[in-house]
Amino acid sequence: RPPEPVAAEAADAGPGDAGVIAGPQMGTPASELVAGFRGCFIRSVPVTVEGRGMRDTWQLSDRAACQLEYPTHRDTSLVIEDGRVLALLPKSAMRTVRRYADGGTVPETDAGR
């Protein structure tokens, strides 16, 4: 008698898709930051992006409801270019440089030395 066929097991494809991350992503229109996302994103200070010039930035509001709704956007700056989110950068990755009226600059970590 021939052996009975054995069903092949599906190959392990790894963990399932984590799903869609809530909140704005690269390419999100800046106009949605104003009216969408429950009003949880606020305009922040403009920054100079090396090789691109001055760009507007937005950040997550400190409101508790916003922090709970969009936890992946805590401590993140959204850099805007051409009316869309260009990048989501950790605030810790941004470098502050003070620019003086005479054109000189001093990095924030220099402490005046």
Image (cartoon, rainbow, N blue to C red):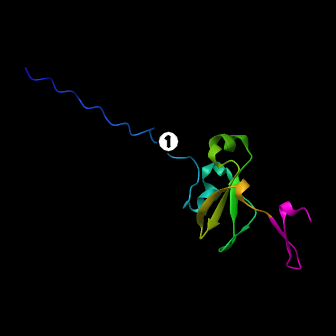
Identity of the residue drawn at 15% across and 23% down: 4
Q: Position of residue 82 (x, y in %)?
A: 59, 71
Q: Is residue 6 above or below residue 28?
A: above
Q: Which residues are magenta?
A: 97-113
Left/right placement of residue 13 relative to residue 58 reads left
> Does 108 lie within the magenta span?
yes
- Reading the image, the residue beneath label 1 is 18
Q: Where is residue 47, by image quadrant?
A: bottom right
Q: Secondary structure at mark 1?
A: loop
Report the residue at 56% width, 55% height from top. Answer: 25
Residue 101 colored in magenta in the image: yes
Find residue 48 and report its image quarter: bottom right
The residue under label 1 is which amino acid type? Answer: Ala
Question: Quick check: 45 above or below 104?
Answer: above
Instruction: From the viewer's side, name the closer residue of 39 and 53.
Output: 53
Q: Height in image: 63 above or below 26?
A: above
Residue 98, image x, y percentages: 84, 68
Q: Quadrant of the N terminus?
A: top left
